[in-house]
Amino acid sequence: MESGWDWQSGPYPTRPYPGQSWCEQGLARRMPHEYVRNGIAKMLTLFCPRSGELRAKGVTATPNTVLHPWLQQELTAILDLMPQAAPVTDTAANQAVWTTWQQGLKKCIALPEDLPPLRLLLVWDNLKGHLTTSMVAWLFAHGVMPLYTPLSGSWLNMAESIQRIIVNRALAGQYPQTPKQIIDALEATAKGWNQAPTPFIWGGKRHARRLRSRQKRHALGGSAAYTHGPVRRRPSALQKSLASCQVAH
């Protein structure tokens, strides 16, 4: 199994988006306080955190008839670029590899008895269209393990982060008035991202706090230096005076 991919979509309506933008010298950029609701656009997104590669397509709706064919096409292209997996010789060991990724889950997907080698992880939300039997069966048949984020936990999907970056770069300070304008801007920005992609590493403030606690690190101001224990401070004159008073009493 080589890597994992995260999936996400939109939506993004036709409205003014706050942000910086260019304008003629001496004139402030103005946005209308009213706008016409002229539809929405969505961006089908597959993101590989390890490499930073982004696969995106703009659409106006994401029914299963749109999502599933696109996802199958992109996943097939990704699998074709990966090294061929060795054939399964030990069915029990191969089943154990798949089952490992379900440890700790409250709801587990029933895995077929006959599984190919595990080649890819697909992280996506707990939406009804993602649970379609035909789609899940297709994933299993191609060596792809679907992992669903918890309910109300879609923020755990790193595709959410890359979408926020792409949308800000494409639409900040702009006033797209048709879904096509939004789609063109999103797809052009996604192409620009892939020219110099940035890998993502899962972390977060809570993770960083726990890591510092385990390593007993104490950060020092002014640099990235740290100590393994708190720096001992010299008592001030007032503290010394208070200490002497307490001793006298």
Image (cartoon, rainbow, N blue to C red):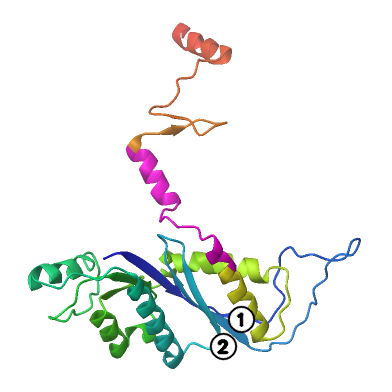
Percent from the top left, x then y, of residue 56? 51, 76
Task: Identify the image quadrant of residue 112.
Answer: bottom left
In the displayed structure, 2 sits above or below 9; it is: above
What residue sits 28% from the left and 85% below the top? 138
Please tell me whether residue 108 belongs to the stretch shown in magenta.
no
Q: Is residue 13 left or right of residue 209?
A: right
Stretch in magenta:
192-214
What residue sits 34% from the left and 75% below the top? 80
Q: Which mark is residue 235?
A: none
Q: Is residue 142 left or right of residue 41?
A: left
Q: Is residue 97 left or right of residue 12?
A: left
What residue sits 67% from the left and 82% below the top? 181
* Identity, as a three-letter code, of the amino acid under mark 2: Thr
- Residue contact at pointers 1 and 2, CB within 8 angstroms: yes
Percent from the top left, x then y, of residue 84? 25, 71
- Name the residue carrying label 2: 60
- Describe the element under mark 2 as helix, strand or loop: loop
Mark 1 → mark 2, Cα distance in angstroms:
8 Å
Residue reaching furthest bottom? 65
In the displayed structure, 61 sits above or below 90; it is: below
* Identity, as a three-letter code, of the amino acid under mark 1: Ile
Please tell me whether residue 206 belongs to the stretch shown in magenta.
yes
Q: Which mark is residue 183?
A: 1
Task: Identify the image quadrant of residue 168.
Answer: bottom right
- What secondary structure do most residues of the magenta stretch adopt? helix
